[in-house]
Amino acid sequence: MTGFHDIKGRKPLKNQLKKLIDKGRISHGYIFEGPKGSGKKLIADAFAELLFCYNQKGLETCKTCKGCTGYKEKYVLETEKSISVDDIRSLVADTELMPFGNNKKIYIIHDADTMTDQAQNAFLKTLEEPPPYAFFMLTVTNSEQIIDTIRSRCIILYTGVNTKQEVLEYLEQNNPDADTKSIYAAACFAEGCIGRAADLINDQSFIQCRKTAVEYITKSQLDFDVKDLKGDVLVFLEILQSLFRDMLVYKATNDSSNLINTDISDIIKRTAERNSSKSLLIAFDSATKAAEYIKDNVSQSIAIGTMNIELMEELNIW
Ligand SMILES: [Zn+2]
């Protein structure tokens, strides 16, 4: 059973939830907003368990009351594509049925920001006059995609992310066979999202792309042929952007603690010191443009070739 003890860090979110519970500020609608891979599902599950319990102690359930031990009516709506009005209609139909044993029914809608306008309007009607036993939790990456009339009826909670240290500890505990370099690379690039880090650590394409991207900024770029890349070219470009972004941050702040790629901060510093902010910005834009071209179906070798030439003219790598 998921509980808040399973969720590392996230003090601001936990404090906010504790306050809501202590003050008895229970709403029928909650929106959990946070980046992809930041554990929104775990958080919504843990919060649902808490709402079922009659004797919560802080953010933990008592595990013995009728709410904890009885049948829990929890419904999860999760779709591959966007959430359609029909998906919402079947959920709404279910809300009209009285609960069985427990006195609550909890509905979790994942990626609710993919609800179509029609779906949102259908959901709004239920949220305006919810049955007393129905509670709704929406997980979203961007709450601005949700119409104001839904948002104003929900408590919006930002889930936050984990510190790099927490991500590292998680990866070390759960990947005893992974090498330190891969653990570091995944932890750095996940930007505080444990779910993303867990995906990256086993993603050979990511590991290869990062290795190639680091070589790219330390060696002559014109030699680079996209055909030799063992991985997804868009992942490679995303990593490259993060490296140029780090150089710009270091250049502006002289501080390496805010870098994404802290494990290679020596390379970031060295390259940043040899180049002007203007050149680094052009390099960042160049990698961004290459990714846009590829998404627009420009051939990969033309997009990367153009970037190679721009960077060769602009950057002082050695
Ligand atoms: Zn309980």
Image (cartoon, rainbow, N blue to C red):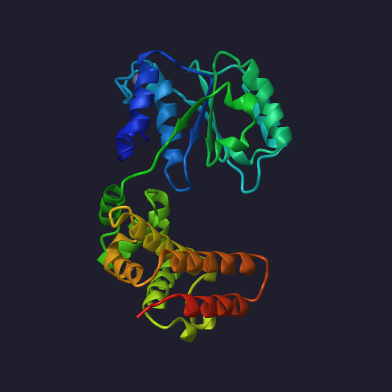
The vertical placement of 35 against 17, above or below, is: below
On the image, the x and y values in percent for residue 55 come to 34, 16
Q: Is residue 253 visible?
A: yes
Q: How many labels, in total?
A: 0
On the image, the x and y values in percent for residue 263 come to 28, 63
> What residue is drawn where x is 46% and y is 81%?
221
Query: Residue 97 lies in what quarter of the image?
Result: top right
| 302 displayed left or right of 169 | right
The residue lying toward the viewer, choosing from 117 and 137, is 117
> What residue is drawn where x is 63% and y is 65%?
295
| 87 displayed left or right of 39 | right
> What residue is drawn where x is 65% and y is 48%?
81
| 9 displayed left or right of 81 | left
On the image, the x and y values in percent for residue 8 come to 30, 40
Q: Quadrant of ligand 1?
A: top left
* Quadrant in which the C terminus appears: bottom left
On the image, the x and y values in percent for residue 288 come to 54, 64
